[in-house]
């Protein structure tokens, strides 16, 4: 399942699901380079950061903010 890292709180990470629900994962299960806003692929066998999906999401958000502030 693809999730977006919303924020870190202590030893847990709060992630947004495709339906907008917020779920909590153990921070220990994430790669050490995971950051807020990253898109991750979460499966029972492990979690990995998806750099291309993260970059697309950030570009899309940047464009939305540029349009908003015009």
Image (cartoon, rainbow, N blue to C red):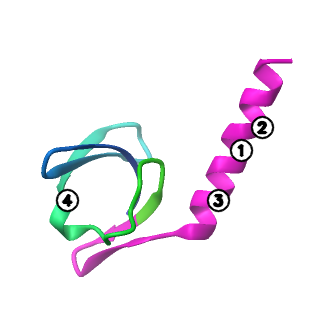
Q: Residues within 10 Å of mark 1 (few under 14, many from 20)?
A: few
Q: Which residues are magenta?
A: 41-70
**Residue 37: % across, % down:** 47, 48
Q: Is residue 61 magenta?
A: yes
SS for callout 3: helix
In the picture of the structure, the residue carrying the numbered disc 2 is 63
In the picture of the structure, the residue carrying the numbered disc 4 is 27
Q: Is residue 54 left or right of residue 9?
A: right
Quadrant including the N terminus: bottom left
What residue is rendered at 56% in x and 68% in y? 51
Q: Is residue 45 left or right of residue 62?
A: left
Tell me whether circle 3 and circle 4 mark residues in contact (CB < 8 Å): no
Q: Is residue 38 left or right of residue 29?
A: right
What residue is rendered at 47% in x and 56% in y? 38
Q: Which mark is residue 60?
A: 1
SS for callout 2: helix
SS for callout 4: helix
Q: Is residue 61 left or right of residue 38?
A: right
- In terms of image quadrants, where is residue 53? bottom right
**Residue 14: % across, % down:** 27, 44
- In terms of image quadrants, where is residue 32? bottom left
Tell me whether circle 2 and circle 1 mark residues in contact (CB < 8 Å): yes
Q: Is residue 62 magenta?
A: yes
Q: Earlier in the sequence, mark 2 or mark 4?
A: 4
Tell me whether circle 3 and circle 1 mark residues in contact (CB < 8 Å): no
Question: Cα distance, mark 3 to mark 4?
Answer: 22 Å
């Amino acid at each position: 399942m693809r999730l977006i890292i919303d924020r870190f709180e202590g030893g847990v990470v709060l992630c947004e699901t495709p339906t907008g629900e917020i779920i909590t994962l153990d921070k220990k299960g994430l790669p050490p380079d995971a950051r807020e806003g990253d898109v991750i692929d979460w499966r029972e066998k492990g979690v990995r950061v998806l750099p291309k999906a993260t970059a697309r999401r950030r570009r899309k958000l940047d464009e939305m903010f540029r349009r908003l502030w015009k």
